[in-house]
């Protein structure tokens, strides 16, 4: 297999810590790659007025596959204040580089697997019949539409005339017509058939390839009839091509309630942007939370793999980092699978599984400690020690 080129975007804060750790694991697993660094994040906002420089887009355009750490974003006023003095009041506006990447490369498929690692002290447990404590094994993969819906950005406060007129033409608008227009805020939820078909198809393909028995559409079609309804009807059409896979349909609210009742019953879940964000955080909480939550943003050409967590600035400056590198390492496993290095991905994931199951090396989150400099004295493994343990298992 030809040597791969991977674009690495460490970003800010602990992104700069965990990404190099994942590369140490990839090296140890024998992944033959060249890594090309790309700039992204707060530093480039402050210095250049752009957190996602064109040169980074060019590198992604060329090499297609990227590992991403995390970025810091801050409220509007802080963003303006922290700009380099020579850039201030020149019309630079901060925007999230992640949302920017998703839109620029149309990374419309977000995939978030949530799997229980045996022996993880953070696993969800529940009380069963006769007071027995049960630890259900969760193996769920969420497919979240990543570019449309409530995150599509088509929104207004005090909508302009033409928009207001269009809204007013809807019979159900009557109840809003009493409100002064400048007191109206409108965020749209637009689904396109093309993108909805792509996310639903991706979900069924994944279920079929990896032997999941069901695909659940998690939306709210009984109330949000047009958009959720469209996803459900596309799923019904698509399901006819996958006779071995059951199509289930749950409402997002009920799903969040059932999360702790029978999480082991679900396989692949597919949702629009907002509900996918919610349900994937919900499931991630059952299998270890931010230290374990990995994700992929996949477009037709470019794919970017990242832990779900942010830049955790309060831990960024530790001389010996304490954050858990597992989420980043599992994101790297997703990258390996995307480029068909399945055997290598399985080896890395198994190494993580053995470290977790043995329980001798645990990051502070696994020990349920509050993050602080003294967690290492209390027996928590440092970021480096956790990576070393994974490498030793390899
Ligand atoms: P965060 O995910 O950075 O941190 C929240 C808390 O989760 C941390 O204080 C820590 O207790 C825990 N945590 C996070 N990663 C961990 C790890 N690997 N191991 C152990 N514990 C971990 O979210 P927060 O504090 O809301 O945001 C901090 C910055 O990150 C903000 O500027 C925010 O905008 C940005 N952010 C970026 C994201 C991204 O790059 N994809 C996603 C979420 C937030
Ligand atoms: Mg989120």
Image: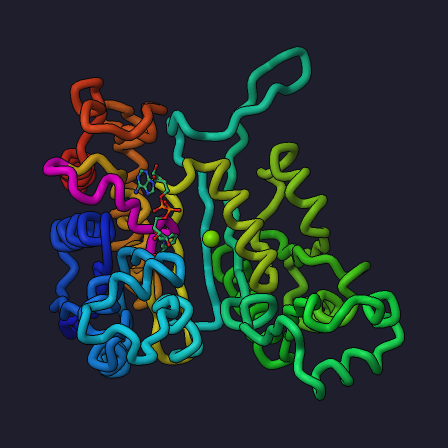
Tell me which residue sits at (32%, 49%) in the image.
Answer: 330
The image quadrant that residue 324 belongs to is top left
Along the viewing direction, whichever of 23 and 100 lies nearer the viewer: 100
Location of the C terminus (image quadrant): top left
- Residue 54's place in the image compared with 382, above or below, is below
Magenta stretch, main secondary structure, is: loop
Q: Is 312 one of the magenta-colored residues? A: yes
User: Looking at the picture, how far across and down is residue 74, in whole percent?
Assistant: 36, 57
- Image-based side of 153 in relation to 363, left or right: right
The image quadrant that residue 170 belongs to is bottom right
User: Looking at the picture, how far across and down is residue 306, in whole percent?
Assistant: 33, 57
Tell me which residue sits at (46%, 63%) in the image.
Answer: 110
**How many numbered marks does the figure carry?**
0
User: Looking at the picture, how far across and down is residue 167, in whole percent?
Assistant: 77, 78
Residue 241 seen? no
Tell me which residue sits at (66%, 83%) in the image.
Answer: 160
- Residue 297's place in the image compared with 133, above or below, is below
Tell me which residue sits at (60%, 46%) in the image.
Answer: 266
User: In the rendered structure, which segment of residues is drawn in magenta?
Assistant: 306-320
User: Looking at the picture, how far across and down is residue 20, in whole percent?
Assistant: 15, 53
Location of the N terminus (image quadrant): bottom left
């Amino acid at each position: 297999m030809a040597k791969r080129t991977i674009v690495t975007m460490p970003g800010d804060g602990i992104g700069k810590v965990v990404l190099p750790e994942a590369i140490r694991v990839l090296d140890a697993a024998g992944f033959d790659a060249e890594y090309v660094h790309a700039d992204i994040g707060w530093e480039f906002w402050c210095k250049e007025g752009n957190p996602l420089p064109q040169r980074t887009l060019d590198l992604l355009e060329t090499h297609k596959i990227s590992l991403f750490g995390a970025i810091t974003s801050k409220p509007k006023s802080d963003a303006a204040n922290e700009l380099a003095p020579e850039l201030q009041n020149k019309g630079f506006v901060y925007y999230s580089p992640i949302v920017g990447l998703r839109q620029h490369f149309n990374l419309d498929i977000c995939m978030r697997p949530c799997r229980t690692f045996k022996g993880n002290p953070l696993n969800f447990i529940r009380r069963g019949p006769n007071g027995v404590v049960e630890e259900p094994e969760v193996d769920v993969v969420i497919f979240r539409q990543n570019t449309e819906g409530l995150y599509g950005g088509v929104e207004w406060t005090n909508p302009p005339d033409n928009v207001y007129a269009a809204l007013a033409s809807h019979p159900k608008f009557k109840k809003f017509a009493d409100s002064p227009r400048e007191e109206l805020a409108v965020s749209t939820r637009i689904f396109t058939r093309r993108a909805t078909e792509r996310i639903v198809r991706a979900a069924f393909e994944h279920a079929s390839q990896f032997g999941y028995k069901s695909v659940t559409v998690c939306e709210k079609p009984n109330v949000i009839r047009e958009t959720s309804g469209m996803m459900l009807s596309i799923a019904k059409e698509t399901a006819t091509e996958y006779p071995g896979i059951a199509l289930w349909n749950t409402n997002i609210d009920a799903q969040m309630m059932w999360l702790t009742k029978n999480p082991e019953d679900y396989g692949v879940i597919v949702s629009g942007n907002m509900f996918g964000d919610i349900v994937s955080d919900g499931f991630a909480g059952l299998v270890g939370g931010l230290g374990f939550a990995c994700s992929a943003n996949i477009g037709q050409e470019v794919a970017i793999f990242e832990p779900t967590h942010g830049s955790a600035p309060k831990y960024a400056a530790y001389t010996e980092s304490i954050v858990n590198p597992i989420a980043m390492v599992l994101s790297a496993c997703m990258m390996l699978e995307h480029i068909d290095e399945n055997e290598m991905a399985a080896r890395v994931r198994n190494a993580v599984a053995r470290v977790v199951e043995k329980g001798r090396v645990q990051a502070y989150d696994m020990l349920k400690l509050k993050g602080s400099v003294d967690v290492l004295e209390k027996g928590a493994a440092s970021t480096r020690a956790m990576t070393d343990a994974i490498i030793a298992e390899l």
